[in-house]
Image (cartoon, rainbow, N blue to C red):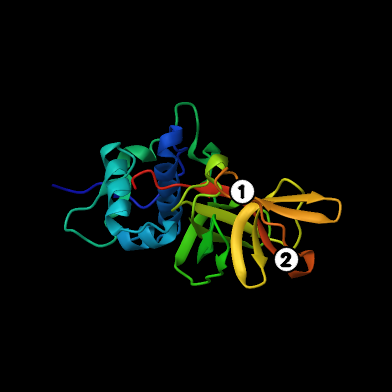
Amino acid sequence: MVDICLLWSPDVPPPFSPTGETRARVYRYVRQRLAQGDPPTVREVQAAFGFRAVETARKHLEQLVADGLLAKRSGGTARGYCLPAAKAAPAQGRSPQQSRPPEPVQLVPLLGRVAAGALQEAIENHEGSVPVAGRDRDHGRLFALRVEGESMRDAGILPGDLVLVRAQPTARSGDIVVALVEDEATVKTFVRRGNRIELRPHNPAFAPIAPDPERLTILGKVLEVRRDLSR
């Protein structure tokens, strides 16, 4: 049997349901790597998305193969995922030149873990990279953190989630921020009332934190929350 695979074609990716958003990001990331002539390995996909297990990355890739969005070369090569030949055909009435180019992907560092609970000592440990669609994120210097704790549960930020953060030293009242109080970091909603500042949780089991403004450092604003639904 002859493998018919393409490194890349500029077809428009199909829509995904909200529950498939992680897989959609994997698909866009693989397409971007193929466009650069550098097919990723399964472990590179794992590192790029911060998956805890390589099997999580493999399951996403295999499901994309089952859905007909990716293909596999025979022979068990490490960089064996590619686009199926059928994806080369341009949409009816559209020339290849009119097809949409792939979204640029920016890799931002995953810098460790941050508390969404009681304050805990800040941890900065480069654990890999997280892909971000470049055209959606202007936005200066970005980094990602993995959340621990449940104080932001009712804001939809759960233990194990990744938060994508824009590094900035200031915040508006109502922003969800990563803040440093002396040497301890947390994710909370920043609220200003006159000269008083609160770092407010979204879980009634946790009390607000009212730090001395002189001891508070805003590390960045949370732009996005990502969740691995296969956990």
Q: Amino acid at mark 1?
A: Pro
**Residue depicted at 71% across the width and 66% down the height:** 217
Decide which of 173, 30 is in the foreground and name it: 173
Q: Write down the quadrant of residue 202 in the picture.
A: top right
Q: Secondary structure at mark 1?
A: loop
Q: Judge the density around disc 2: few (<14), some (14-19), many (≥20) Cα neighbours within 10 Å.
A: some
**Residue 209, x across and y down, in percent:** 67, 56
Gap in angstroms between the C-alphas marked 2 and 1: 16 Å
**Pointer 1 local density, CA inside 10 Å: few below 14, some 14–19, many at least 20:** many
Q: Quadrant of residue 34?
A: bottom left
**Is residue 215 placed above or below 27 in the rendered structure?**
below
Q: Where does residue 172 sit, x and y in percent of width and height? A: 77, 50
Instruction: Identify the disc placed on residue 173.
Output: none
Residue 15 seen in the current view: no
Q: In the orientation shown, which residue stands out farthest toward the left?
A: 1
Secondary structure state at the residue bearing disc 2: strand
Closer to us: 51 or 84: 51
For mark 2, what is the residue? Answer: 216
User: What is the three-letter code of the residue carrying label 2?
Assistant: Leu
Q: Position of residue 191 (x, y in %)?
A: 74, 49
Q: Residue at 16% across / 58% down in the picture?
A: 75
- What is the x, y in percent for residue 158? 48, 47
Q: Which mark is residue 201?
A: 1
